[in-house]
Image (cartoon, rainbow, N blue to C red):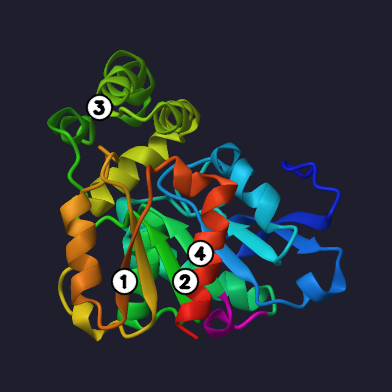
Amino acid sequence: MEDPLGSTSSKFEGRMVEGADGWNLNVLSWTPKDEESANRRPVIVIPGWTSVVEGWLPLLSKWVQHRPVHYIETREKNSTKSPKGHKERSSDYEIPNHARDMDKIVRNLNLKPSECDWFASSLGSTCVIEGVKKGHLEVNSAFLLAPNAEFRFPWWMVIMTSMPWWFYPPMMRMIAIPYMKWKVKEPGQKKRYTRTMRNADMRRLKLSTKANRAFSIWPELETVTAPIAICVAKSDALHAHDDALKIAEILPNGEVVEVPSNQFAHEADVIPIIEDWILSVK
């Protein structure tokens, strides 16, 4: 696999790594060529629901110059390989299973999850919090963009879960993408989400939607004592701003970090904010 960053300052490796229950997930790893940077604490990046790496290139291109970075794609992505002979079902895509994947994959990279700094977005952020809560995951610190407290799917998407998965592609073109373009105001975020919807695995999208409809992050949230930053943007129309603030308020070591936009959190300019926060909690 070619390096999607085309980086000259870091060594790249892309491969499938075994997660929980025999699932194999795509992992993209960069190690700085500079020895001092290569020895810094690794960053584990968990993207959002159906997110593609192209949306993270501005941030990753800068970060991989200064830290080892491991980008882990979650189960619902096109790249994932389920166990041989396994008939995929909605329960495969429940939040705790994603967290269990993260833990096992990081350990299979010969790293300790508790000795890594974690950066995640949307569903990825939710998985980190839930994983720590359920004891599936340990973190040194976690900087989490727009975690989902609950998954409030629009009515038409709920209806779609009762239809065959092959019904999804025309519905995406006719309803989902136009809805996304209407709902999202940030140009960068609109472009990213349109791209992810076009590239999503429709069968897994259906199963993942069914799996997450009843999810709630609120029970026992106060038991999560790890240092966690909740990164929010008021202009983000797709993630509940007030829910994110409430999550940070309940977490014993939670802190709110406001950024100008969701797109800003995908750019290199957010890295100093993340690094300064990590230093402040250590």
> Disc 2 designates what residue?
277
Image position of 22 (left or right of 4): left
SS at circle 1: strand
Of tags 2 and 3, the one toward the viewer is 2
Q: Are marks 4 and 2 in contact (CB under 8 Å)?
A: yes
The percent coordinates of residue 99 (x first, y second) are 42, 69
Judge by depth and name the residue closer to the eye, 200 or 59: 59
The stretch in magenta equals 111-116
Q: CA distance from mark 1 to mark 2?
A: 9 Å
Of tags 4 and 3, the one toward the viewer is 4
What amino acid is found at the position of numbered circle 2 in the picture?
Trp
On screen, 178 above or below 122? Answer: above
Q: CA distance from mark 4 to mark 1?
A: 12 Å
Q: Is residue 212 visible?
A: yes
Q: Quadrant of residue 29?
A: bottom right
Q: Specify the label residue 255 is tagged with.
A: 1
Judge by depth and name the residue closer to the eye, 160 or 112: 112
Q: Is residue 83 visible?
A: no
